[in-house]
Image (cartoon, rainbow, N blue to C red):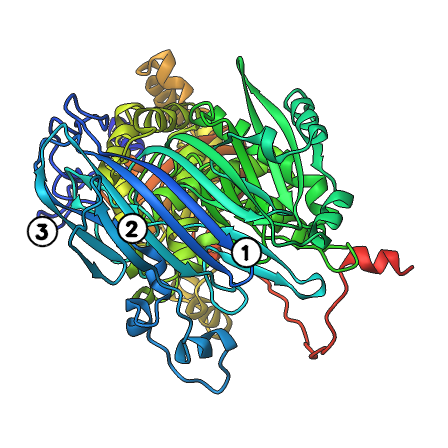
Amino acid sequence: MKKLHFSILTFLFVCLAGHVSAQENTNISKFRQLKQELATPNVYRTASGAPGHEYWQQQADYNIKIVLDDETQRINGSETITYHNNSPDPLNYLWIQLDQNIRAKNSLRVKVNAVEMYERISPRSMSYLHYDFDGGFKIESVKNESGENLPYTINYTMMRIDLPETLQPGSNVILNIKWWYNINDRAKVFGRSGYEYFEENDNYLYTIAQFYPRMAVYNEVEGWQNKQFLGSGEFTLPFGNFDVSITVPDNHIVAATGILQNAGDILTGDQLDRIEKASNSDVPVMIVSEKEAIKNEKDKSSKTKTWKFHADNVRDFAFASSGKFIWDAMGVKFGDRTVMAMSFYPKEGNPLWEKYSTKVVAHTIKTYSKYTFDFPYPVAQSIHTDRIGMEYPMICFNGGRPEADGTYSERTKWGMIGVIIHEVGHNFFPMIVNSDERQWTWMDEGFNTFLQGVAEREWDHNHPSWSGNPADIVDYMKGDKSRITPIMSNAESLYQSGNNAYQKTSAGLNILRETIMGRELFDFAFKQYAQRWKFKHPTPADFFRTMEDASAVDLDWFWRGWFFTTDHVDISLDEVKIFTVNSMDPEIEKPYENKKKESEPEHISIIRNREAMKSAVEQDKTLVDFYDKYDLYKITNEDKEDYKSYLGSLSDEEKKYLSPEYQYYQLKFSNLGGMIMPVIVEFTFTDGTKKLERIPAEVWLRHEDQVTKVFPFHKKVTGITIDPYLETADADTGNNHWPPKPEISKFKLYKYNRRSPKNPMQKEDNK
């Protein structure tokens, strides 16, 4: 009896402890610390992920004069750059970004663009084969403060200026550059900036960026960040102060980075009054109405106006200009400050833009501020374009256009709201938390897409497709690994940039927030990162270290798996075994064993023998002995005495373990995808209730491929599901159930319809 008791306890101990065999020495643990992957901490960047006590960064101040030629679609510009060397290094030359040169006839992007011929090729692909737009910078002069020419060398999208004297630490140098370039038509020549032409009234809408030679970043991590601009890796820029004068046609309205300095010279008294009213309004106020915009687009003349803007502590400058702009605004309060949320759009954007744009801008800066820092700039502006979304400090260009009749699909509505949130949100990442976009796309696009999803869910709980949903990244992560790169890859080397840098990064952050860390720890740590690195230049290591430092959660296994590899999540529920404890009570156990024995089927050989013949014992009764008559399952007094003695050897605590109410469910899980992840298990019971068990990722510490866990319950389990809320990006939910559930999919018999389908709003209007 004692031996049997010991065996029961041993069984329970092994089940609860799981597999404890150590991993073979030849294996490399997925839980090893990130040491060799990260730069060594130093006086500039600490081991905690914060800026060090000797952190420094450069500054570039600009005074720019721009003329927008509406007849030739050309930018003419001149600028004075004051470059401050705050580094401890003497500099003999400076690097300038000439990003417009990506559209030069001999651009590096055109030369390296790989195009393959197919039976069907899009016009855009063909345009690369017949590229003849001359859109690069035409540098007319580069001079010093005294007006003397400075030697310079242009290497595609980068220009090196050789200094006549070494720029010493703590000193500054003044550069004067004059240039011009042809503005691209976005319908013909793809670009983040450019113009849209409205043929019906011979008007242009300009959204202009990368329009001036811009200082490259110099820091202690890369030296000069002078990687060529090929299109995917965006922009890395130092902070500075801007004074910009923009001369445009007299009927144009201009929106730009910064604060308008000469509003009294170019706006009417009514418009100035409306701006004042808007600053104290919690709903949008029209500054330029649709009626006024229609008049403006008709009043074309050869006269011009110059709009003057000033911006402090920004890394870039962009503007939009058109005679078609409707303009509305509202104030957003941050303590004793008022930030102006504004939108500029042509009548073609209505009614969608008038209804939503500015309110979405306001919602975005309030929501992002809650999770990072108060929006520090005085304005946030959304400009309507016909194509892509693109971001710059205090201003962004966003698509989402209704049909010509003013109706729109639900997809257009949500797409417009999403792109405005995303592009306005970029003010935080990377315009303020100023990561290296040329190298690490995920540090701005992924973070921003994550917060976009947060803002979308806070805009509408029923948002149909919020950004960063882990379930949406499954197909990508389980796809052909030869066409997938780790997140920690150079921006120009990414396969499927949207899935990789945007969606996988944001899905990973959602998993950290909702599943691994919890909201309280994640939100605190993420806010620490944002506040530590606002108006500075963080690296990936700074983010990884801050998240761990501020949460006391070891996440090296997550960074390595999710960011440094292409492993995917696939946790399989391989086996479920059900145990009940042997109570040792003969009144319970002997009937149970008897019933179990009776339920066992006879072997087919015995059945056939019984039908075909009599056994020897049946034929010769002298062969019958005591055991042929003995009832193994009869309860005897000796059994009762043994049980009484057994109970006497147990403590009250140990006696509780003998309760027949308990059932022990032993679950065996396999990690088939390679990516470590917490195991989330939902149990459904006979009474219809459910219980969710969250097992931390550390369960895989000593057994990364397979692990066993035991769960005791008072009631019977009828179903088990892994990851019931689809929160871990599990790639195969078919192995997530017990009993197994067949997954049924539907197919559609498709017949091609040449007509464009009407949106539901149009269908309703036609009733």
Please tell me which residue lies in front, 147 or 534.
147
User: Where in the figure is residue 234, as x and y percent of width and height?
Assistant: 35, 51
- At horizontal 23% and vertical 28% (from top left) the residue drawn is 49
The residue wearing badge 2 is 438
Residue at numbered disc 3: 26
Q: Quadrant of the N terminus?
A: top left
Evaluate whether residue 577 shows in this view.
Answer: no
Looking at the rendered structure, the secondary structure element under dot 1 is loop
State the image coordinates of residue 336 (x, y, percent, origin top left).
53, 13
The extreme bottom residue here reads 119
Which numbered dot is residue 111? none
Left of 306 or right of it: where is 250? right
Q: Secondary structure at mark 2?
A: loop
The image position of residue 53, as x and y in percent, is 16, 21
Percent x, y for residue 39?
14, 39
Q: CA distance from mark 1 to mark 2?
A: 46 Å
Crowdedness near tag 1: few (<14), some (14–19) or many (≥20) residues, C-alpha within 10 Å: few
Whether pointer 1 and pointer 3 mark residues with C-beta atoms closer than 8 Å, the reply is: no
Foreground residue among 467 and 6: 467
**x 59%, y 24%: residue:** 332
Q: Is residue 420 left or right of residue 763?
A: left
What amino acid is found at the position of numbered circle 2 in the picture?
A: Arg
The residues tagged by marks 2 and 3 sit, at their Cα atoms, a distance apart of 38 Å
Which mark is in front, 1 or 2? 2
